[in-house]
Image (cartoon, grey):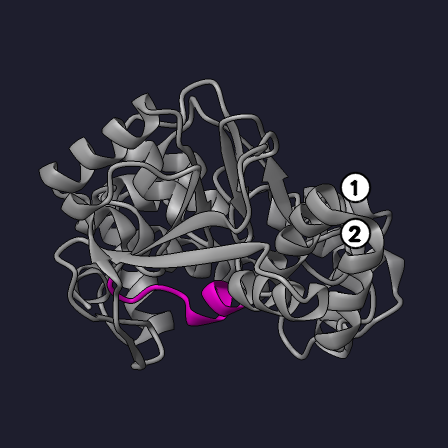
Amino acid sequence: MRLDYTGPTPEPIGFLLLPRFSMMAFFSAVEPLRIANRISGRPLFEWTLISEDGGPVTASNGMTLLADQAIEAVHHLPSLAVCSGFDPERHLSRALKRWLHRLDAAGCVLGGLDTGCFLLAAAGLLKGERVTLHWESLPAFQERFPAIATSDELFELGARRFSCAGGAAAMDMALDVIARRHGQRLAIDVSEQLVHERMRTRHDQQRMSLARRLDTHNARLVGAVDLMERHLEAPLALAEVARRSGVSLRQLQRLFERELGRSPRDWYLALRLERARHLLEETDLDVLAVGLACGFASSSSFSRAFRQHHGASPRQIRQG
């Protein structure tokens, strides 16, 4: 969704649907545009659904949408949103890569909803850009594409690229575009129609606060978990976590067991193994590389802990 669109209305926007795309992110982006058209009484936006072969595409929730066009039939678009979900790079064929580069050369602004930036990055179309993704996918993207700048904003709107964290963040990005194009009043009216309590800016947090997620107001416990979440690749010793949190190791043990029902060791290990699962699902890093990225010294120790926690081996998780 380009910032500098000055063409006629309705403004055309393309949505490239990839298999297992996020329906939530897609509808969150489209519905504000539809409501803006209705409230304004004239067509401000129009959208085209595109698939690689022009056929229907099934989303991650099992629902299927019909595409309007195949990629080979689309030559000019002001902007295109890549809608994907799990394992997006699997769907980057040579034909799709060539098509994306042709659109880019023709001046199309490219963007990603949810995990769409994985595909754009794999196609070599995000050099020098800063992007955001869903908080769950950000670590995997950073491992896979360390040279590309990322943020944890709700959305990013640049001159040639845009991205959003998916889910309801796509709604906030669409509302921002409506406000830029057609005024804040219209955007507010659309937001109220969506029963969207307030228009979040790009700087709003993707996730609720750690204290709310943990359902605790204990600052030392929150600080300890925050330290763990920030040190997954090179885990801190529990004694160091305790020291930095301002408690003794014994106090740390009691805090976790009382507030979270688990030992700090088990909690920390679970965090690392959840990160490992995301990396296996969303990158092509080999099992050893995933284990190292999550603080394990060997593939055997990683595989053993992973199987015990998830009930399946890393290779079984990857094969789906």
Q: Is residue 201 left or right of residue 50?
A: right
In the rendered view, tell whether residue 234 sits above or below residue 172: above
Residue 89 is situated, as x and y percent measured from the top left of the image, at 24, 46
Task: Please give the residue where the numbered disc 2 appears in the rendered image.
Answer: 223
Q: Residue 87 carries which label?
A: none
Closest to the observer: 317 or 244? 317
In the rendered view, tell whether residue 25 sits above or below residue 13: below
**Amino acid at dot 2:** Gly
Q: Residue at x 52, y 51 (%)?
A: 10
Q: Which residue is drawn at 81% across and 62% down?
A: 188
Task: Please give the residue where the numbered disc 1 appears in the rendered image.
Answer: 244
Q: Which residue is drawn at 54% across and 41% down?
A: 8
Closest to the observer: 144 or 133? 133
Residue 79 is situated, as x and y percent measured from the top left of the image, at 44, 40
| Label 1 element class | helix
Q: Where on the picture, by quarter, is residue 230?
A: top right
**Amino acid at dot 1:** Arg
- Is residue 236 part of the magenta span, yes or no? no
Circle 2 Cα neighbour tier, 10 Å, few/some/many (<14 / 14–19 / ≥20): some
Res 255 seen here? no
Proximity of marks 2 and 1: CB atoms separated by less than 8 Å: yes
In the rendered view, tell whether residue 38 sits above or below residue 3: below
Which segment is the magenta one? 19-27
